[in-house]
Amino acid sequence: MRRLAPGWPAMGTIPSGAFILGMQVHPTSYAQAAGLLPGWAARHSSKYVCIATVNNVMESYDSPDFRRVMNNADLVTPDGMPLVWALRLLGYRNATRVYGPDLTPILLEKAAAEGLPVGFYGGAPEVLHRLVEVVAQRFPRLQVAYAFSPPFRPLTPEEDEQVVGDINRSDARILFIGLNTPKQDYWMAAHKGRVQAVMVGVGAAFDFMAGTKRQAPRWMMRIGMEWFFRLVTEPRRLWKRYLKQNPRFVVLFALQLLGLKRFPSGKASQV
């Protein structure tokens, strides 16, 4: 696990965030998140954590509803290097990446050590089955209390109530959500206060840990080119996200940095 860099807020506290195009992002670290989330989970807190990329920021810019979802999250980590660079340009010199597929095994290891049951919600049935097998092999002390692959259609209210009841009866303290953005973020916001667990939206982490999708090489991640790798491997699904959203983000953030454009913050209410 990475060391907490000098200047970070104390363990167990939420760092103050910066607003990037009106969406709050917290300049946190792996070590801080790994100290904070299990503490919430041990207290049966109902909270949600968004792992944010440029796509989250642009969805938030385009949709006031989604901006409220993101700004009411209990923690928003910078998943992509462009958001890390943006935070540094805004004065958060110690900002580092907190990437969902790397944060997931860190939290699983902490949960195993601290006796916190976990759950998984999302992914195709075969991916979820393989994920549970891999997790059991890597973390033999971990208790996987819940795993569910929801259908692609929206759940009926009755089905949703059943899911919430099943999660709560399982006593899962950390619930990993493996949907996509913005679906997983809307889901977590809608279930805060109902699901008695810390919900963490980790997106493609299920596929990566299960071995059903390839991750970009680390050198591409370091230079902020992971998006290009994913575009090449999944062009039909991701072309619009990257070829439309990334250039818009660069232009709009430049305007923010130069003070030439102001953005509505949609600042989070106290929840």
Image: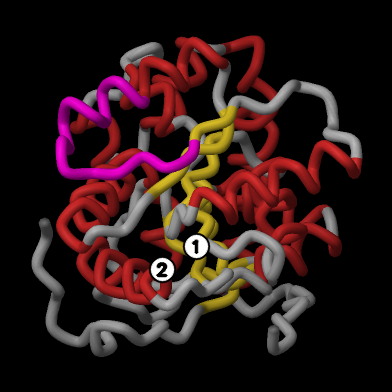
Q: Nearer the viewer, residue 54 or 269?
A: 269
Label 1 close to label 2 by CB (< 8 Å)? yes
Q: Which residue is mark 1?
A: 198
Quarter-of-image position of residue 219: top left
The residue segment tinted magenta is 132-146
Q: Which residue is mark 2?
A: 41
Counting other residues with Cα less than 10 Å from the Cα at mark 2, is it few (<14), some (14-19), or many (20 or more)?
many
Q: How is colour applied across the structure in the image?
A: secondary structure
Q: Residue at x 74, y 85 (%)?
A: 269
Rounded to the nearest angstrom, the CA distance separating label 1 from label 2 is 6 Å
**Residue 231 at x, y = what percent?**
51, 19
Q: Secondary structure at mark 1?
A: strand
**In the image: residue 255, left or right of residue 93:** right
Q: Residue at x 24, y 41 (%)?
A: 222
Query: Which quadrant would the C terminus be assigned to in this image?
Result: bottom right
- Whether residue 181 is visible, yes or no, is yes
Q: Secondary structure at mark 2?
A: helix
**Residue 226 at x, y = what percent?**
38, 31
| Mark 1: amino acid | Val
Q: Residue furthest right?
A: 157
**Residue 72 at x, y = what percent?**
67, 73
Question: Looking at the picture, does residue 9 appear above or below residue 147?
Answer: below
- Whether residue 58 is visible, yes or no, is no
**In the image: residue 146, left or right of residue 239:** left
| Mark 2: amino acid | Ala
